[in-house]
Image: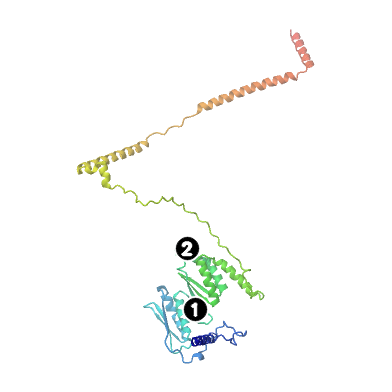
Amino acid sequence: MMMEQEEEEMIRVENKKQKGKHDKPKPWDEDPNIDHWKVDKFDPSWNEHGMLDVSSFSTLFPQYREKYLQEAWPMVKSALKEYGIGCELNLVEGSMTVTTTRKTRDPYIIVKARDLIKLLSRSVPAPQAIKILNDEVQCDIIKIGSLVRNKERFVKRRQHLVGPNSSTLKALEILTGCYILVQGNTVAAMGSFKGLKQLRRIVEECIRNIMHPVYNIKILMMKKELDKDETLKNENWDRFLPKFKKKNVKQRKSKSKDKKPYTPFPPPQQPSQIDKQLETGEYFLTDKKKSAKKWEEKQEKQAEKTAENRRKREAAFIPPQEPVKQDSGRSDDDKNVADMAILLKKKAKEFGKQKALENINAEEYIAASGEQRSKKKSKH
């Protein structure tokens, strides 16, 4: 028992020693003068003897790129020659190949050359693609074709990413500091690691319909402004950034059909053609009688159709009904109006006479009557 306990303690001590073996603080970890993210330019003196083995990468390109690649290949060849990389353009197979040579010193340059031919095959212009050979520039090819199943939705969302007159794409290029090319089912991007990370998130959110690129552009612009302020540089920016809520448009609910109650029994079997003939008695008729019956039915149908056609032809010669004049009604109305006008005139005369009698002065009436009598006497 004592021996087993001693062995266990020895194992624990050894494990402790191994666990903290490389966790000692290094002098360059906390040095403020050292930029840990900086990529030093490769010096050929670091690898004087070159590569021990030959590495090569090849990629296929579409047929429509053949003519352009033939024209731009001398430029690509001269750019790769500076880094000691050999390249070959095979027009028969439709492929590009890059290989290391004895003059190659940088071991990572072959990976950069592989990215170069990959970009060239994805319609990136040669002068832009050659920039990938610089240590500061990286590339990322985002596959967007498999994110959406519906082709129409995919095309619409891809157009959101590009924007009218490629305005959205240009804004993203300025804010992320990356070159962006939307081609078919992929998005090719070139830039720094930070910019590529932001761009991948924006592209995937756009294609998955999580957030429109315009909102992401607004957020990036605000982050750029906040980064300039020294006091807010090391603080959390969530309180300053806008929060966009996704608005779901209510879709019309499809009218659900009333489900019939479930029954374990199958529906009744429909009668076959023979069953129908047995019911009508047609099954037992001879061929002559059957043909005679068919002929009679055909004659009846023809007679009905000819009668209908004759009716249609005769309908064109039937004169339309003339509208009845309603003059008698109008004349009665006119008579009634005339009678009413005569009555009103009579009543107006009577009313005028009554008013005249009411306004007569007695003295004037007597004097006027006396004058009339004297005139009559003088005439006699």
- Is residue 66 rendered to the left or right of residue 216? left
Find out whether the residues at labels 1 and 2 contact each other: C-beta distance under 8 Å: no
Q: CA distance from mark 1 to mark 2?
A: 34 Å
- What amino acid is labelled 2 in the image? Arg
Q: Quadrant of residue 240?
A: bottom right
Mark 2 crowdedness (10 Å alpha carbons): few <14, some 14-19, many ≥20 = some
At horizontal 53% and vertical 70% (from top left) the residue drawn is 202
In-front residue for pair 75/18: 18
Mark 1 crowdedness (10 Å alpha carbons): few <14, some 14-19, many ≥20 = few
Look at mark 1 in the image and give the residue it sits on: 127
Q: Position of residue 325 (x, y in %)?
A: 48, 29
At horizontal 63% and vertical 74% (from top left) the residue drawn is 227
From this view, report whether residue 143 is shown above or below residue 135: above
**Dot 1 or dot 2, earlier in sequence:** 1
Camera-near label (1 vs 2) is 2
The label shown at residue 72 is none
In-front residue for pair 265/76: 265
Q: Secondary structure at mark 1?
A: helix
- Is residue 320 rendered to the left or right of residue 31? left
Look at mark 2 in the image and give the residue it sits on: 153
- What amino acid is labelled 1 in the image? Pro
Q: Secondary structure at mark 2?
A: helix
Q: Position of residue 343 (x, y in %)?
A: 62, 22
At horizontal 23% and vertical 44% (from top left) the residue drawn is 283
